[in-house]
Image (tube, rainbow, N blue to C red):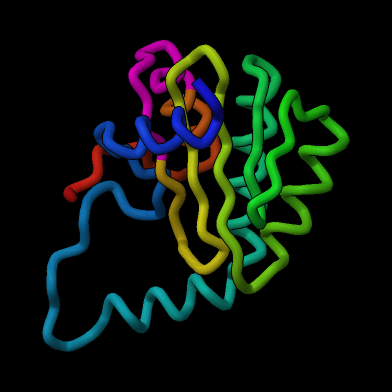
Amino acid sequence: MDTAAIIEELLEEKAYLIDLFPERVPYDPDGRYFTVAEYFERSREDICRRFTNILLKLFCFYHFSITWDDVLTEDVTADQLISMLEKFFSSPTGFLNILLPGYDTLITADAGDQYMVCRSRNEDVTSLLAQLTAAEGLFFRKSAD
């Protein structure tokens, strides 16, 4: 099965978020969430550093294939990954797919979001990812959607 087909299949799996919040923020008519979200957006460098740390640590355990700007890079090297993540997280737009070949796991990131999404059928991967996320002071949780 080709990489695009695997990604499409994994997009149907349950989603976990790597997020700033431990659960979905409830609707609030006074708009405080948006004020807080704007604050975190101004602190984007810190969030991106945490996301980068999580992905680099995960990479020490698993091989990555990355699709970014419709370009597939299989068997990414550490230097390639570092360069890609630095460029991706410093861009205002873009979408990144990280596939862990053989482990039924896909991690997606949108440059404009303050979270990443993991879809996985592999409990070992999700357990490790939850630990790495917690070590960065973020939350690994099931998506409400």
Query: In the rendered view, does 10 fall on the left or right side of 58?
Result: left
Q: Residue at x 25, y 34 (%)?
A: 14
Counting from the top left corner in percent of width and height, residue 126 is at 40, 22
Q: Quadrant of residue 99?
A: top right
> Closer to the camera, 60 or 84?
84
Counting from the top left corner in percent of width and height, residue 2 is at 54, 26
Q: Residue at x 49, y 71 (%)?
A: 40
Q: In the current view of this chain or complex, which residue is farthest to the bottom?
A: 30
Query: In the rendered view, does 80 fall on the left or right side of 99?
Result: right
> Closer to the camera, 120 or 131?
120
Query: In the rendered view, does 23 fall on the left or right side of 128?
Result: left
* Vertical position of residue 11 compared to residue 126: above or below: below
How many numbered badges does the structure rendering display?
0
Q: In the current view of this chain or complex, which residue is farthest to the right?
A: 79
* Vertical position of residue 102 compared to residue 100: above or below: above
Query: In the rendered view, does 85 fall on the left or right side of 22?
Result: right
Which region is colored magenta? 118-128
* Vertical position of residue 4 compared to residue 145: above or below: above
* Vertical position of residue 72 compared to residue 105: above or below: below
Q: Residue at x 33, y 53 (%)?
A: 21
Counting from the top left corner in percent of width and height, residue 12 is at 27, 36
> Closer to the camera, 142 or 101?
101
| Residue 100 located within the stretch drawn in magenta | no
Counting from the top left corner in percent of width and height, residue 13 is at 28, 32
Q: In the current view of this chain or complex, which residue is farthest to the front?
A: 1
Q: Residue at x 17, y 88 (%)?
A: 30
